[in-house]
């Protein structure tokens, strides 16, 4: 018997942030207000529409671009607002939904707003700015910009995808399927179809309109209601796909745009999955090499021997799932999810060592806690977001996927060649979308950008979730762009890299100074 596969692609910068928090010996997720400075709550502020910006609204969307929003005090030192957008941009006179946004006001002389997306699809920009405004961004950026985080359509507070209770999500993560048999694959497809039906009934018709093109159109409405003539934007991981989509749709509205941890929009879902499988395998080898230099590493011998010990441990759990201290049975997929989560940030590698050391001794509780962190499951059993649900729903609209038995099994063989340790767990993602109630609305294609404002694309040499070669490909597709590469480990760079990269991005965002193309930090 084998376990349910991981999603075809992994998610966002927020996973890396949570992974870093997992460094604590107790392996708990830190949560606090990070702005610092004046703790007095802000006053409400009404954003009145700028007539010149409203004039740029696409035909039929004037009422959305001209809406006046109220920024109410919220979450301590922040301001929050709801922005109305069409549910279906093909029918702007029809039903509307609301996009939830959170603002960290500029600490100095404001030059504009910086809209931020931490990735996914499914990650909350609202939460990211709330949790990381004071630590992730430099004083110069905080002085120059209002930081605006938002939940894209389908995510958490913005017409969220709703499919299952917390108990049902636990049960789905615990399911085991024998994919190598026709009966096992049929059972997985049947369960996926049942979940898709629940998503459709509980979410409503907006489920068919949470694709990335629609989210990019929301982004332009957000630009208008914060009264910026140009979009200043920082996107991580999936947020780079959202940003490059925006640039192709609204090239004249691009201001200063940083795309960190780039997705290549031109390649298929299967090629994306294969690229990630190889990159995570590479990251695992880098982790093992680092671990073996430490005194308490449980992995002996050389790097290949250490990786083989991890494979043997995974195989043993595939054969016999193990109980954690909370009574839950840990299967191989949950174990691998826990293994992968700390690979998003090398600062959390000590937590992975701790979890592996315990697992070798028979206790998989810490590995399950790491998997829970990646899945947004709190210690009390509640799920703090709908990120995994939104992830699947958006991808089913954005990508055609191989979902026939022969195709998925052939992909499994390729993935196991690409990544002998982890490849199997990236396979069979097509089961999720096989019976999705809405067909994909996009096919992969190279992005086209004709704007005058140069874009900065950032890649990290050891990035497991968005391989560095994708950044080079995106930079080439955009044309008017500059590639900035960090020699480092983990997912994305800005906010945790060296001063070379941090200063290059800051100087671009604050002063408009474009880093030289192909700069390596």
Image (cartoon, rainbow, N blue to C red):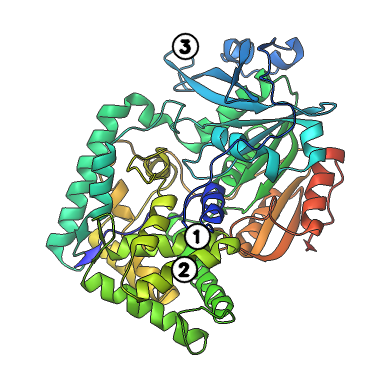
Q: State the separation of the CA atoms marked 1 and 3.
A: 54 Å
Residue 385 vs 24, above or below: the answer is: above
Tell which of 309 and 240 is nearer to you.
309
Disc marking residue 354: 2
Contact between labelled residues 2 and 1, with CB atoms less than 8 Å apart: yes
Q: Is residue 300 left or right of residue 483?
A: left
The residue carrying pointer 3 sits among few (fewer than 14), some (14 to 19) or many (20 or more) residues within 10 Å by Cα, namely few
Q: Tag 2's secondary structure?
A: helix
Q: Nearer the viewer, mark 1 or mark 2?
A: 1
Q: Nearer the viewer, mark 1 or mark 3?
A: 1
Q: Which residue is mark 1?
A: 25
Q: Which residue is at a point 75% across and 23% down the rendered structure image?
A: 229
Residue 426 visible at all? no
| Residue 468 percent location from the top left of the image | 63, 63
The residue carrying pointer 2 sits among few (fewer than 14), some (14 to 19) or many (20 or more) residues within 10 Å by Cα, namely some
Q: Quadrant of the C terminus?
A: bottom right
Tell which of 162 and 53 is nearer to you.
162
3 or 2: tag closer to the N-terminus = 3
1 or 3: tag closer to the N-terminus = 1
Residue 249 vs 63, above or below: the answer is: below
Q: Is residue 159 left or right of residue 193?
A: right
Q: Which residue is mark 3?
A: 93
1 or 2: tag closer to the N-terminus = 1
Dividing the picture into quadrants, the one containing residue 270 is bottom left
The residue carrying pointer 1 sits among few (fewer than 14), some (14 to 19) or many (20 or more) residues within 10 Å by Cα, namely few
Tell which of 262 and 360 is nearer to you.
360
Residue 370 vs 122, above or below: the answer is: below
| Residue 237 percent location from the top left of the image | 57, 50
Residue 2 visible at all? yes
């Amino acid at each position: 018997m084998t376990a349910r596969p991981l999603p075809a692609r992994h998610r966002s910068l927020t996973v890396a942030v949570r992974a870093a928090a997992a460094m604590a010996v107790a392996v708990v997720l830190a949560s606090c207000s990070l702005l610092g400075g004046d703790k007095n709550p802000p006053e409400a502020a009404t954003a009145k529409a700028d007539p010149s910006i409203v004039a740029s609204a696409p035909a039929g969307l004037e009422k959305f671009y001209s809406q006046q929003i109220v920024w109410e005090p919220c979450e301590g030192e922040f301001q929050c607002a709801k922005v109305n957008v069409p549910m279906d941009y093909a029918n702007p006179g029809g039903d509307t939904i609301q996009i939830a946004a959170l603002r960290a006001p500029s600490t100095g002389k404001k030059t504009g707003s910086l809209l931020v997306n931490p990735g996914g699809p499914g990650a909350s920009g609202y939460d990211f700015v709330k949790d990381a405004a004071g630590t992730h961004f430099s004083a110069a950026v905080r002085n120059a910009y209002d930081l605006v985080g938002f939940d894209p359509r389908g995510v958490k507070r913005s017409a969220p995808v709703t499919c299952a209770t917390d108990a049902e999500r636990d049960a789905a993560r615990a399911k085991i399927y024998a994919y190598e048999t026709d009966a096992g694959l049929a059972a997985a497809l049947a369960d996926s179809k049942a979940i898709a039906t629940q998503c459709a009934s509980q979410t409503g018709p907006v489920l068919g309109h949470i694709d990335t093109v629609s989210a990019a159109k929301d982004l332009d409405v957000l630009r208008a209601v914060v009264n910026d003539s140009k979009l200043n934007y920082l996107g991580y991981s999936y947020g780079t796909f959202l940003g490059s989509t925006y640039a192709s749709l609204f090239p004249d509205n691009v201001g200063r745009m940083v795309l960190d941890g780039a997705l290549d929009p031109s390649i298929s879902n299967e090629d994306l999955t294969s690229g990630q499988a190889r990159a995570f395998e590479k990251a695992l080898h880098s982790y093992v090499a680092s671990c073996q230099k430490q005194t308490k590493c449980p992995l002996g011998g050389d790097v290949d021997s250490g990786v083989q010990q991890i494979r043997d441990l995974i195989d043993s759990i595939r054969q016999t799932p193990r109980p954690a201290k909370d009574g839950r049975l840990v299967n191989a997929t949950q174990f691998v999810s826990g293994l992968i989560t700390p690979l998003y940030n090398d600062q959390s590698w000590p937590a992975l060592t701790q979890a592996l050391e315990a697992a070798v001794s028979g206790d998989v509780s810490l590995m399950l806690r790491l998997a829970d962190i990646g899945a947004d499951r709190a210690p009390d059993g509640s799920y703090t977001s709908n990120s995994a649900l939104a992830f699947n729903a958006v991808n089913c609209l954005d990508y055609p996927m191989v979902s026939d038995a022969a195709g998925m099994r052939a992909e499994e063989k390729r993935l196991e060649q690409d990544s002998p340790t982890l490849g199997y767990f990236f396979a069979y993602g097509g089961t999720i979308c096989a019976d999705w109630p809405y067909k994909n609305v996009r096919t992969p294609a190279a992005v086209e950008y004709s704007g005058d404002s140069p874009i900065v694309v950032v890649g990290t040499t050891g990035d497991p979730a968005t391989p560095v070669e994708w950044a080079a490909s995106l930079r080439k597709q955009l044309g008017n762009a500059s590639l900035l590469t960090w020699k480092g480990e983990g997912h994305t760079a800005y906010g945790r890299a060296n001063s070379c990269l941090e200063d290059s991005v800051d100087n671009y965002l604050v002063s408009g100074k474009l880093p030289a193309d192909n700069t390596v930090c």
